[in-house]
Amino acid sequence: MKQYVQDVLELVKRRNAEQTEFLSTVKEVLTTVVPLLEENPRYRDEKILERMVECERIIIFRVPWQDDKGEIQLNRGYRIQMNSAIGPYKGGLRFHPSVNLSILKFLAFEQVFKNALTGLPIGGGKGGADFDPKGKSDNEVMHFCQSFMTELCRHIGPNVDVPAGDIGVGGREIGYLFGQYKRIRDSYDAGVLTGKGVDYWGSLARTEATGYGLLYFVKNMLDDKGIDIKGKTVVVSGSGNVATYAIEKAQAFGAKVVTCSDSNGYVYDPDGIDLAAVKEIKQVRRGRIKEYAQTHPKAEYHEGCKGVWTVKCDIALPCATQSEIDLESAKALVANGVQAVGEGANMPSTLDAIAYFQENKILFAPAKAANAGGVATSALEMAQNSERLQWTFEEVDERLHRIMKNIYESAKRNAEKYAAPDDLVAGANIAAFKKVADVMLAHGLV
Ligand code: NDP
């Protein structure tokens, strides 16, 4: 089976040369499912692997818009509809200049398995544009979102494909996107997007869900080893949606978070991050994280993001973007005594960094399991939209709690059965792969 997986990986490489992020995630998933393939050769005989690595559909489109000076601007929009075996395509939209086909295919591939782990009926997709909302006026962001949705609306719908936010797409962007969809379709299809405002069919606790869910997962992992999160020093990267609510819940659990960052640099506050100040800078003023040091005399600001991983900590939570922790950063974390790493961002650790953590027996919570709370709560938003009701914050949070516990237990069970007891990377991949593969077999050759 190992040889068969190598052959499939070679094929994927030949057909997707240059798509490094996509190739990396495919390699991570396929190499860990070998024991499952040995147990059930039907997956090989019916070419499930080859089918899974091929997107069901890719949509690429032109997004023309006019800036405040009246000049015409052009961006490229994408939607990757990766796998709809267990439900409508579901996954965020990313607006960032780095967006390209490889990054979106990697995110969509990850999303298929992450969504399967939630136990909720959602397939996997991802999309976005190489548009940078940073430095744009609200008016420019609205014009861009309207143009983007004018094309995207042909390809999505509550039972077809349900996008949400991701990097660069928060409540403001979802509002503009939903407004345009509603106008074009002339129908209040609230379930077409998630991450909506609570006054127009959004779910309470969706904003907090990815960060809170990450902490619920990490706490399960630590509790299992008899480690108390209270009093631990935590290093967080990012200061966006995931980072903000990861910090909030870590602090609520009694941990001390000493860093956060943005794409320019990071702040280190030995007294513990003042989250109200971060929210004011990032959510209200849309400013830069270096402003934090101007009002917090003990805090240090450092240019560049990598240094954040040289700060001494017990727990590291990468919550910014992909490939933030390379082998060198992993070595620095281990040398400084890190006990656990929980991935809030998607694929923030490179494959050699993950291998290094595992060799050094560091507890490692992989993204597709640990950050699944966001999409799980998006699926809960879809459920509320279907029944035209809104649940309380406590009800949603309670369900999120249970979902993260189930994901942890499922990853752990499969790790013990098929790999090594603490190998949650393999455990999560196997649990998710099995679910998607079995449904694909049930649907026949489609
Ligand atoms: P946001 O846009 O809210 O925040 C992103 C943060 O990461 C910002 O602080 C940003 O800094 C920083 N960042 C972005 N790009 C880079 C880069 N190239 N190098 C260094 N820092 C960077 O996004 P989210 O918090 O929503 O998403 C963060 C990660 O979590 C992503 O990997 C996303 O895919 C993943 N994720 C998000 C979910 C969600 O529900 N939102 C769900 C599951 C995963 P700056 O302000 O300078 O841009």
Image (cartoon, rainbow, N blue to C red):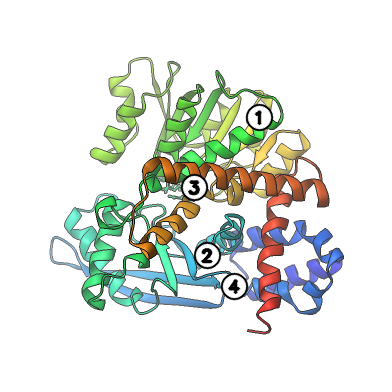
Left or right, 100 with respect to 207, comes to right
- Is 301 situated above or below 261? above
Ligand 1 has an atom within 8 Å of the beta carbon of the residue at disc 3: yes
Determine crowd level at label 1: few under 14, some 14-19, many 20+ residues with C-alpha closer than 10 A.
few
Quarter containing the C terminus: bottom right
Look at mark 3 in the image and give the residue it sits on.
321
**Front disc: 3 or 2:** 2
Q: Earlier in the sequence, mark 4 or mark 3?
A: 4
Q: Nearer the viewer, residue 422 or 359?
A: 422
Determine crowd level at label 2: few under 14, some 14-19, many 20+ residues with C-alpha closer than 10 A.
many
CB within 8 Å, label 4 to label 2? no
- State the CA–CA distance, disc 4 to disc 3: 28 Å
Q: Earlier in the sequence, mark 3 or mark 2?
A: 2
Residue drawn at x 61%, y 60% is 113
- State the CA–CA distance, disc 1 to disc 4: 34 Å
CB within 8 Å, label 1 to label 4? no
Does any portion of residue 129 appear in the rendered image? no
Q: In the image as oriented, which residue stretches furthest toward the left?
A: 69
Look at mark 1 in the image and give the residue it sits on.
223
Q: In the image as oriented, which residue stretches furthest toward the bottom?
A: 445
Q: Secondary structure at mark 4?
A: loop
Ligand 1 has an atom within 8 Å of the beta carbon of the residue at disc 2: no
Residue drawn at x 33%, y 31% is 278
Look at mark 2 in the image and give the residue it sits on.
122
Look at mark 4 in the image and give the residue it sits on.
85
Amino acid type, residue under disc 1 in the picture? Asp
**Front disc: 4 or 3:** 4
Residue 346, x across and y down, in percent:
54, 50
Amino acid type, residue under disc 3 in the picture? Thr
